[in-house]
Amino acid sequence: MKTFTAFIAAASVVAGASSAQTVAIMDGRVHTVSGGVIEEGDVIIRDGRIAQVGADLSAPAGATVIDASGKVVTPGLFSPVSAIGLVEIGAVADSNDATPELQSPTDSFPLGASLNAIDAYNPSSSLIPVNRAAGVTRALMAPNPGPSFFAGLGAVIDLSGRPNSVTRAEAAQYVAMGERGAERQGGTRMGAWAVLREYLDEARSYHANPNDYIRRPHDGRFAVSDLKALGPVINGEQPLIVSVNSANDIRTLIRLKNTYRLNVIILGGSEAWRVARDIASANIPVITSGLYNLPGEFEDIDATLKNAARLHQAGVKISFFDDAHNIRLIRQHAGNAVAEGLPFDAALAAITLNPATFYGLGDQLGSLEAGKIADVVIWDGDPLEVTTRPEAVYINGRPQDLNNRQKMLMERYRNLERGDLPFAYRGGE
């Protein structure tokens, strides 16, 4: 039997293998997410998929056997939205493709909804291995809103860093409303909601008869490529992520959803707890923060750390988000929400199965079930504790290298007395 320690030492070599191997993770505390917890449970991985999950299973002949005794086994974490893969250094323009910007006040940039994150995706970003080493295996990569309040099309990616790491292209559209939308549309929420309705109406008109629409005279306010990109949204096939925080904006969004029969997801929702029952009745998921209770804007004035727990209690599906550099912190958001009353199982689902479900991937990802894609993490303790670390991460059944730039810098400068360091770092005169 290969020991767990020996396996980790070899993980970086195996991670580059062209095909996934058969792996038997034995005797761990297995959080399946969809089917409860299995004490001393086993997970069998074959050909990139989960073949079996249960107790007292037999390791297949020839499998790499991992002794997970005393360890915790969960699905890989799934970040529901961020700009990972689009930004390296936010303050450096040529390494930041997340947000379209105008070069001067007189410039114009006409596109929004038709922007596609895939066109700028960098699977070699140093942010990917940093977050992968913290147990994140999938993410929705999405642009940020620029001059237009539409940000564009996001894609679900895996964090293997492989060139073919796109799981689902054009998985969601993103629009900024609330204060962020108002500042782009005349400085008022009335203007932002009116313009959004105009876009939806124009997109409906275009898709009803594209040739007729193009032949008709237009004032140029609506780019045809944007209207074309909104087709799956107006058909209810593609989720529309809507950035809103105040209870009033959420009520308006619910009316909009019902009028246009949209599939919407709330992003932010700092006051969502105030209208939790309405959100649940409208079947709208909420991607929120588990750390936010200090209002940065008037629209956040009723923010509370109990937001997630109250939403869950009302029957709302939730998830947690953080910025591109720190999507690994979603488990800290989840842990803080548990401290404020969210059940542990619901918190774990919020960062695994729920995001997969939001983007139509719940039958493939997010839980440990036979037949699903083998995104699996083995932890040295409670995954919602900040001091816990992954000891192994699998994506598509392949063990991943957990080394990353931050770890290498730490190791390089851990001992400042090493003679091979640059003079300024040697710790002496």
Image: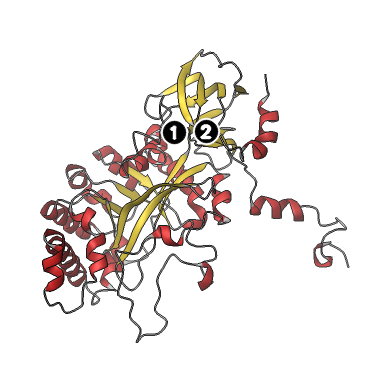
Query: Does residue 427 sit above or below 329 in this rendering?
Result: below
Pick the front one: 295 or 133: 133
Marks 1 and 2 in Cβ contact (< 8 Å)? yes
Residue at x 62% of width, y 43% of height: 402
The Cα–Cα distance between marks 1 and 2, rounded to whole angstroms, is 7 Å
Identify the image quadrant of residue 138. Answer: top left
Q: Name the residue furthest bottom.
A: 106
Residue at x 31% of width, y 41% of height: 360
Mark 1 closeness class: few <14, some 14–19, many ≥20 residues within 10 Å: many
Spot occupied by residue 84 in the image (x, y as percentages of width and height): 47, 56
Q: Amino acid at mark 2?
A: Gly
Label 2: which secondary element: loop
Spot occupied by residue 27 in the image (x, y as percentages of width and height): 56, 19
Residue at x 68% of width, y 24% of height: 3
Structure colour scheme: secondary structure
Image disc number at residue 373: 1
The quarter of the picture where the N terminus appears is top right
Q: Amino acid at mark 1?
A: Ile
Query: Does residue 424 sit above or below 72 in this rendering?
Result: below
- Residue pointed to by mark 2: 397
Label 1: which secondary element: loop
Position of residue 128 in the picture relative to residue 154 (left or right): right
Spot occupied by residue 202 in the image (x, y as percentages of width and height): 15, 66
Q: Earlier in the sequence, mark 1 or mark 2?
A: 1
Pick the front one: 34 or 125: 125
Residue at x 50% of width, y 29% of height: 47
Identify the image quadrant of residue 92. Answer: bottom right
Pick the front one: 133 or 218: 218
Mark 2 closeness class: few <14, some 14–19, many ≥20 residues within 10 Å: many
